[in-house]
Image (spheres, helix red, strand yellow):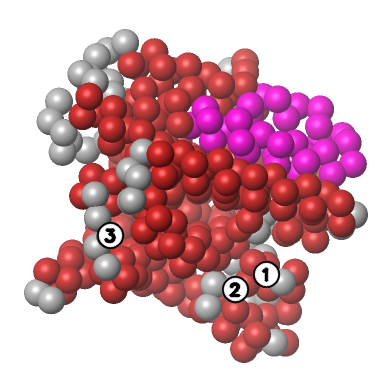
């Protein structure tokens, strides 16, 4: 395996993460679980929101991986321009579409508040703007806030290529645990509790775990020969991830139980994802290859799938999915929503996102 070869395991985890998120949101809108007869896998649509945690881990990995390989910081302008070309055009397009196609009453009353908070990615900081305009945008706010925090970590970590990210993960984990404990102590209820538990400090152990994984993979790929046995480690990590998903059963009956358990499993999830990533990166078997297409279109699929599903709900007259007795209607809705979302995401990825990214790369190359 060449040392510059694409890390297939990242495609696998990214494809898994987006599949989980879409499964969850379509289950919410149809109340049909396509995996309900598949044993332990039946929990995946109900817990698919954990795909966002996987995305945050992957973000930490992918941000730090090129720096770990190069051994140097590329400069703030290069870093910010690369992030901007990747994130902003597709985000702005979906933001406009959501405002036009699904305008919310609260947004119409205070349009500038909601628009400016989303353009500045500060919307996850207040309850009024947290889920406004388009619900899935909350995670983009958290992501971009970490982008601004990342350069400081990267410069410090590069001084000690392996020890720095590992110690950094330790301290970021302490910060995340302390913050989550503080949220529990505030006594906040309902969506306010969810909002606070889903803000940037609460995810620092996942972001930090991704960065530590990148540093570890970088060192191991230089010192350890690829071997199929590493695939077993990858599978072990995935088994733990599945077990963590299943561990939620019953906690949704407790007071704040599901959110409390979600916060509790973030650190074990980061460890399991590290094991999965290291095993997959050192395996020569191309772990994750079947999910490469989903991984490629994942950003646009994440942005657009709930917008497509909501419009489809209206077109099919599904206002209260839990009251729908026609199983055929539930199945048709889910299949059509998947099909349209995938087609639209592929169109936008190949026709909009990738051309802009290539243009950005040419622009940076000429400077």
| Mark nearer the N terminus (3 vs 2) | 3
- For the residues marked 3 and 2, what is the alpha-carbon distance in whole angstroms? 27 Å
Q: Position of residue 303 (x, y in %)?
A: 48, 59
Q: Front-most of 12 and 147?
A: 147
Q: Secondary structure at mark 1?
A: helix
Q: Is residue 113 magenta?
A: no
Q: Secondary structure at mark 3?
A: loop
Residue sitting at 80 percent across and 61 percent down?
Answer: 192
Check disc 2 and report the residue beneath it: 122
Q: Is residue 151 left or right of residue 229?
A: right
Q: Front-most of 325 and 231?
A: 231
Whether tag 2 and tag 1 are in contact, CB under 8 A, the answer is: yes
> What segment carries the magenta color?
244-273
Q: Position of residue 362 (x, y in %)?
A: 13, 69
Residue 325 visible in the snapshot: no
The C terminus: image quadrant? bottom left
Q: Residue furthest top?
A: 229
Q: Residue 125 — which label?
A: 1
Residue 48 placement: quadrant: top right
Q: Front-most of 302 and 195?
A: 195
| Mark nearer the N terminus (1 vs 3) | 3
The N terminus: image quadrant? top left
Residue 360 versus residue 25 in the image, above or below: below
- For the residues marked 1 and 3, what is the alpha-carbon distance in whole angstroms? 30 Å
Residue sitting at 65 percent across and 85 percent down?
Answer: 113
Whether tag 3 and tag 2 are in contact, CB under 8 A, the answer is: no
Residue 149 versus residue 230 in the image, above or below: below
Check disc 3 and report the residue beneath it: 73
Mark 1 Cα-neighbour bin, 10 Å: few <14, some 14–19, many ≥20:
some
Q: Is residue 263 magenta?
A: yes
Q: Main secondary structure of the magenta part?
A: helix
Nearer to us of marks 1 and 3 is: 3
């Amino acid at each position: 395996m060449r040392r510059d070869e694409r890390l297939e395991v990242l495609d696998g985890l990214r494809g898994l993460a987006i599949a989980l998120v879409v499964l969850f949101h379509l289950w919410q809108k149809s109340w049909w679980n396509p995996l309900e007869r598949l044993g332990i896998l039946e929990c995946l649509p109900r817990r698919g929101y954990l795909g966002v945690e996987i995305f945050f881990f992957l973000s930490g990995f992918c941000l730090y991986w090129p720096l770990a390989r190069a051994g140097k910081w590329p400069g703030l302008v290069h870093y910010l321009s690369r992030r901007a070309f990747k994130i902003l055009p597709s985000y702005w397009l979906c933001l406009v579409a959501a405002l036009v196609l699904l305008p919310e009453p609260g947004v119409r009353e205070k349009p500038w508040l909601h628009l400016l908070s989303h353009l500045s990615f500060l919307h996850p900081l207040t309850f009024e703007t947290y889920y406004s305009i388009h619900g899935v945008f909350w995670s983009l706010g958290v992501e971009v806030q970490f982008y601004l925090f990342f350069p400081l970590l990267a410069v410090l970590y590069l001084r000690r290529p392996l020890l720095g990210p590992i110690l950094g993960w330790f301290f970021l984990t302490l910060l995340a645990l302390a913050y989550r404990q503080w949220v529990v102590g505030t006594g906040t209820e309902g969506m306010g509790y969810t909002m606070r538990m889903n803000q940037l400090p609460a995810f620092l152990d996942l972001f930090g775990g991704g960065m530590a994984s990148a540093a570890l993979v970088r060192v191991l790929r230089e010192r350890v020969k690829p071997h199929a046995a590493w695939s077993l480690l990858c599978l072990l990590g995935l088994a733990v991830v599945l077990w963590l998903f299943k561990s939620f059963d019953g906690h949704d009956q407790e007071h704040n139980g599901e959110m409390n358990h979600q916060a509790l499993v973030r650190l074990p999830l980061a460890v399991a994802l590290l094991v999965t990533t290291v095993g997959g990166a050192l395996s020569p078997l191309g772990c994750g290859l079947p999910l490469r297409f989903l991984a490629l279109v994942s950003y646009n699929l994440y942005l657009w799938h709930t917008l497509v599903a909501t419009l489809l709900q209206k077109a099919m007259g599904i206002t209260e999915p839990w009251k729908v007795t026609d199983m055929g209607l539930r199945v048709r809705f889910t299949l059509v929503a998947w099909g349209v979302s995938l087609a639209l995401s592929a169109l936008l990825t190949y026709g909009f996102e990738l051309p802009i990214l290539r243009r950005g790369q040419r622009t940076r190359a000429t400077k």
